[in-house]
Amino acid sequence: MTLQDQQLPIDREILRELVASSPDGWKQIDYLVDVTWHDGYESLFTDIASPEGHDPAEASVSDELSEATERLLDLMKEYGLRLRSIRGHAWLDDQGRWMYKANFEYNP
């Protein structure tokens, strides 16, 4: 099984949790993750924002979203990849389906 095969269900879970963590009415969600490495241990800063200008205090990172993110980091580590940041974006498409894409930055 490839990294992408293993990552897909985690990405889907992240999307589900992003939608669940955001108020009704949000049609776009940004998910920001910054990872700091300390002697092999990572600390995370996570945040949910609205590119539509909604009050960010209306949304909060759930435990389930944090756990899915940690599973993604663990998976990447299994493949020798140390993430520096994730910039995820979810949006409601014209058919009413939630879509998700993410850009990853890696540590050398």
Image (tube, rainbow, N blue to C red):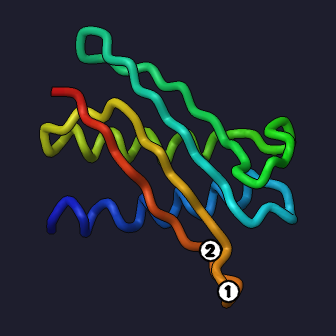
Q: Residue furthest bottom?
A: 95
Identified by mark 1, the residue type is: Asp
- Mark 1 is surrounded, within 10 Å at the Cα level, by few (under 14), some (14 to 19) or many (20 or more) other residues, namely few
Residue 73 drawn at (x, y percent): 34, 40
Between tags 1 and 2, which lies in front? 1
Residue located at (48% from left, 25% from top) = 44
Left or right of 66, for residue 22: right
Q: How many labels does the image show?
A: 2
Say if 2 sits above or below 56 in the image.
below
- Mark 2 is surrounded, within 10 Å at the Cα level, by few (under 14), some (14 to 19) or many (20 or more) other residues, namely some
**Secondary structure state at the residue bearing disc 2:** strand
The residue indicated by pointer 1 is 94
Residue located at (42% from left, 59% from top) = 10
Identified by mark 2, the residue type is: Trp
Q: Name the disc covering residue 37, or none.
A: none
Quarter of the rendering containing residue 96 = bottom right
Say if 74 sits above or below 35 in the image.
below
Quarter of the rendering containing residue 24 = bottom right
Residue 5 drawn at (x, y percent): 25, 69
Q: How far is disc 1 from disc 2 in space, using C-alphas?
A: 10 Å
**Secondary structure state at the residue bearing disc 1:** loop
The front one of 69 and 22 is 22
